[in-house]
Image (cartoon, rainbow, N blue to C red):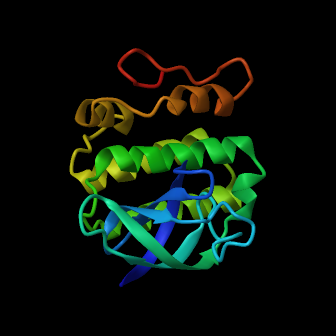
């Protein structure tokens, strides 16, 4: 049985009663677990599996494949304010998806785990902003060793990762000031 701290970054329906739960962890990186029966109201997982939760998780490694068996979950933080704000949900999801593009499965990335936790905590406390999104991108580029002086991180990440998550454009539109000077982005990804 394995255990560690993890942040729940995605839930995928497996069956009528079970979820595939995607975690980002410090010690194991990205992992996928199967939570059998978790969609049932009487499940021991009821109320413990939601996006952006931090938890102590226990799982049994799969004999083959990448789907491990989730055994126990002890929630440490729920980040409830994120779920009450669509922009916060969108930015949090963007950060998680960007990390998924940047790292390999089952490869420890403690610095990136810390970056994600700090980003989600910031979004939970302060809300979503273009500045928070750009800061996350810049810190991710630095951690990946691809940051370039005086250049926004988005184009560099786009080149290195083969693209950026599609919700970035929606975030720019929704989070830009509604005044006369909205944030615009050129084809290269640089902000105008």
Q: Is residue 42 above or below residue 40?
A: below
Most foreground residue, 62 or 54:
62
Residue 71: x percent and y percent?
49, 78
In this view, 125 is above or below 177: below
**Residue drawn 25% across and 40% down?**
148
* Residue drawn at point x = 27 percent, y = 63 percent: 106
Give the quadrant of the N terminus. Answer: bottom left
Q: Residue furthest right?
A: 84
Count of numbered tags: 0
Give the image location of residue 32, x and y in percent: 40, 60
On the image, the x and y values in percent for residue 104 come to 25, 54
In the picture provided, is 46 more to the left or to the right than 26? right
The answer to whether 189 is drawn above or below residue 149 in the figure is: above
Residue 55, image x and y in percent? Answer: 55, 75
- Which of the pair 139/109 is nearer the observer? 109
Location of residue 131 (image quadrant)? top right
């Amino acid at each position: 049985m394995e255990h560690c701290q993890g942040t729940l970054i995605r839930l995928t329906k497996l069956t009528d009663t079970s979820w595939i739960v995607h975690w980002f962890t410090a010690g194991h990186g990205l992992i996928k677990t199967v939570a059998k029966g978790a969609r049932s109201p009487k499940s021991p997982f009821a109320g413990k599996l939601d996006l952006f939760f931090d938890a102590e998780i226990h799982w049994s490694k799969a004999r083959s494949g990448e789907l491990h068996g989730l055994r126990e979950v002890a929630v440490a933080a729920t980040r409830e304010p994120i779920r009450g704000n669509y922009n916060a949900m969108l930015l949090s999801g963007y950060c998680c998806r960007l990390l998924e593009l940047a790292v390999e499965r089952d490869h420890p990335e403690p610095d990136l785990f810390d970056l994600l936790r700090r980003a989600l905590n910031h979004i939970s406390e302060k809300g979503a902003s273009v500045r928070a999104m750009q800061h996350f991108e810049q810190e991710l580029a630095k951690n990946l060793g691809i940051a370039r002086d005086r250049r926004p991180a988005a184009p560099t990440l786009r080149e290195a990762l083969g693209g950026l998550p599609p919700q970035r454009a929606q975030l720019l539109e929704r989070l830009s000031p509604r005044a006369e000077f909205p944030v615009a982005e050129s084809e290269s990804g640089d902000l105008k």
